[in-house]
Amino acid sequence: MRRRGWHLAVVAAAVVLMGIGPGGCHKLDHRTAPQKLDQAMSKAFKRAFAAYYRMTTERPRSRIVSYAKTTCHPREPVPHSDRGWRWFCAIRWIRRDPTTAGTATYGVEVDPRGCFQASSASFPPRAYELVLHRPAPNPLDHIRSCP
């Protein structure tokens, strides 16, 4: 029983020292950088494509996209207020079956915490979901992530 109390005290002290917890969620000095947004957007796109595949085929396949190369660049200087920072991202992607590949473009908005929302006209806004037997929002049309 003593060990448990000691362990909890050590964990609590570590949380306080590392700035994690209720007070640890604060604005960063910088919102993002091109390389960081490239990586985060690539991962988010792969997850969204897996969700789209599962939604339209009823078969889960988490690694359906084998390659997603993302190139992002800011559309404006870093805003000094809390409004979103606008970026443009282009993604070249290849599915695991080699017959399918494509390019998608996204308008991205990065908030002060570094979280982003991306919208695209490269995919239809709705896709037919087999489970619901009706059109539903397409996960590839609007991507949200907080890396």
Image (tube, helix red, strand yellow):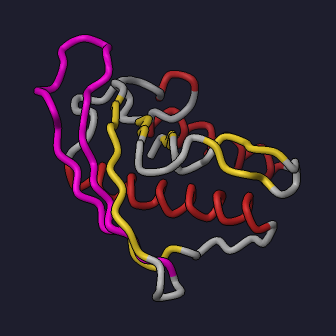
Asked whether, in this view, residue 13 is left or right of residue 106, the answer is: right
The residue located at (24%, 42%) in the rendering is 88
Please give the range of residues in magenta.
69-95
| As drawn, 99 above or below 23 | below
Can you give x and y, in whole percent of width and height, for residue 6 in the image?
71, 47
Does 50 appear in magenta? Answer: no
Q: How many marks?
A: 0
Of residues 82 and 56, which is closer to you in this image?
56
Asked whether, in this view, residue 9 is left or right of residue 122, the answer is: right
| As drawn, 125 above or below 23 | below
Residue found at the far left of this picture: 77
Can you give x and y, in whole percent of width and height, for residue 120 in the image?
41, 43
Residue 60 figure quarter: bottom right
The residue located at (57%, 24%) in the rendering is 22
Asked whether, in this view, residue 94 is left or right of residue 39, the answer is: right
Residue 117 figure quarter: top left
Can you give x and y, in whole percent of width and height, for residue 91 in the image?
32, 60
The residue located at (49%, 78%) in the rendering is 95
The residue located at (34%, 24%) in the rendering is 112
Can you give x and y, in whole percent of width and height, for residue 25 in the image?
47, 27
Main secondary structure type of the part rendered in magenta: strand
Of residues 146 and 62, which is closer to you in this image?
62
